[in-house]
Amino acid sequence: MHRFLFPLLATTFLFAYCTSDPKTPSKAAKKPSNGHERMIAILDSIADYADPLECYNLNSKKAVLIKQQWENAPAKDKLTMQLRYADQILRAGKNEAAIMEFQDIINQLGDQLTPQSKPVYELLALAYLRLGEQQNCINTHTAESCILPIQGGGVHTMTSGSESAIKLFERILKDYPDDEQVRWLLNIAYMTLGKWPAGIPVKYLIPEKIFQAKGDIRFNDIAIPLKLDTRGLSGGVCMEDFDGDGNLDLFVTSYGLRDRCRFNRNNGDGTFSDRTKEANLIGIFSGLSANHVDYDNDGDRDILVLRGGWLLGGTHPNSLLRNNGDGTFTDVTIESGLLSFHPTQAADWADFDGDGWLDLFIANETQDPKRPHPCEFFRNNGKGTFTNIAPQLNLNFVGFFKAATWGDINNDQRPDLYISNLYGNNKLLVNRGGNGPESWIFEDIRKSSGTPGSGHTFPSFFFDYNNDGLDDIFCTDYSIDLNDQGPRQYVKEILGKQPAGTWACLYQNQGNETFSNRNKQAGLNTITYAMGNNFGDLDNDGWTDIYLGTGKPDLTSLIPNRMFRNVNGQRFEDITMNGFGQIQKGHGVAFGDLDNDGDQDIYVVVGGALEGDLSNNILLENPGNSNHWITIFCEGKTSNKDAIGARIKVNILQKNGGKRSVFATVGTGGSFGSASLRQEIGLGDARQIESIEVTWPKTGVPKSIYTNIPIDGAIKLIEGVATPETVSLGKLKFKV
């Protein structure tokens, strides 16, 4: 028996260097004449010259090289090389070819299922399952495709892939009945055939209660008729009114080196149009994440595209796309001084020194200490340019950072920074002020505050989950085990055998620069493998809910994206099975009222990192509710234009005569997904708004208090102006 099989598969790299010469022009490219064209040439060069042996997601090109090595290998190594080749073409999405290779390997091994050969049988079963997904969920997807529990339009019409996978999974389980991961995939395979739960052997059945919906909230995917079901890999999303017509548009990225960024304009009549070409975005490729702000205070929201995350070579630049105010964008990365070459997907904006201009912190990724990629902190010079002052402020940290988010933990009108570390402790940097930009002081209080994270933290964000006026912190664990790349730990948990660990942290702000982890009391210490993340209010009850896009890079990672409904600021209820449980990998997430009807819809970028792990993005329409709401636009004068960082307090009188307050902070939300800067605030059963208080994001600026504000409408609050402005937003009906 070939004993190489198990260790070879168990140590498959998740991450690898992706190197190229970004300064080498593409052979076909004309000489660039400006910064926008230069960036296009750089991105084109990266795609042309990236080394497939050092870039883990260029699977087709890597397979070609491995096949050449296989053909020239000595006889004793040929089976090893064939397995490597089969694994790469499976990752590339060439499932039928992979099936033939895995079957041939099994035949050469005498079709004997042993501990050493078991991984090959699992890969063959996975290839069949992926074939079924490709033929049905991806190529002919419906609104119910890949959403747990799979039913209705999600049931496969082309059944051979899942049928063959079931035979193999059951053969494996006969000899290895305690393999939770194979059991989980078997249940999914039966679901895709419409034969679950009745058709699956009882001894392998995952309890039906796991897949039961809770309560009346039910969202449905309407992306297909609106042509928003973009197919691609992992990526980011920005939901914002980029053209100033009052309707929220969508900017979406995808991870592939030649995947284009897409701009979908909301036409205001229930439809969207792909305006990528008209927006001057052709050639602006790739991007694992993105966020948006008005960095130049001109009234138009600009976009930052983040690249190179997980690709440790660090030769991928970010892009700052300036909104020209005429429906077009220009890449001004080079002119602005933001050009650098580091791997990242994490950045956030705040006016750290109160000069009225938004500054940018970028958390870069370092795994090899010999090739460090320090974090960058770009101060906005106010003239369309930035200066990196991270070294002067000792903010040039080196680590594998996966999230950066600003909040204000002590309500001193200065933004504080939280950074998530995949391999180490997180950082909570309190802004202590200073006498000048380059002498500013940030104090790391992670130890004294009790906010270190799990040691393997990915997403994080500030939010006030219990409406006490203090910023709390949420972050989740993302442990990477090269010997267990699938969702085995998640399956153990749902079967009642959760492994010990801190799987998520809900740090409740105690008001004295310390926090208490309430993860267990709130029902959030659950295994999610979260990546994408954001928060909003599903039912306008005034309590902030959480949506997590989930998954691991491995193709076996078919686990649901998660939705947690906030129950009165005391606990969170898992309502994933209410139409939110998409099992393809979830990344950028944005909440927002796309149809201006007073409730928040959710757009999610869906797809993995590997070349063949494609999927279709989803738009979950809010079905509506009977609660009240208010939409608030804030505008700074001495503070930044969009008043990012402003704290809003809405004081309401309830129907029963009781009083309560709902809090929100102006920003784009989570660390992987960028929601609208307008604040869409649920008011529950409010009878009236007694007042709205705004604490502006600049020290010394007095709080503004507004009264006589109607519910169920939109207003603009301007710093220094006592009277709110009424904003008219045209309600529309999606054409679905």
Image: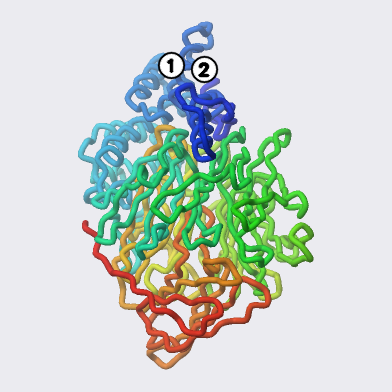
Q: Rate crowding at label 1 as few (under 14), some (14 to 19) or many (20 or more) other CA atoms within 10 Å.
A: some
The residue singled out by tag 2 in the image is 2
Picture quadrant of residue 176: top left
For residue 158, above or below residue 412? above
Give the side of residue 342 with respect to residue 269, left or right: right
Say which amino acid is labelled 1: Leu
Name the spot of residue 327 as percent of width and height, x first: 39, 52
Q: Say whether marks 1 and 2 touch (CB < 8 Å).
A: yes
Q: Is residue 187 visible?
A: no
Of the pair 39 and 623, the residue shown nearer to us: 39
Say which amino acid is labelled 2: His
Q: How is the image coloured?
A: rainbow
Q: Is residue 655 visible?
A: yes
For residue 117, above or below residue 608? above
For residue 362, above or below residue 470? above
The residue singled out by tag 1 in the image is 109
Name the spot of residue 14 as percent of width and height, x first: 55, 34
Of the pair 273 and 101, the residue shown nearer to us: 273
Picture quadrant of residue 445: bottom right
Name the spot of residue 145 as percent of width and height, x first: 29, 47
Give the side of residue 189 with respect to residue 77, left or right: left
- Seen at 59% across and 74% down, the residue is 696
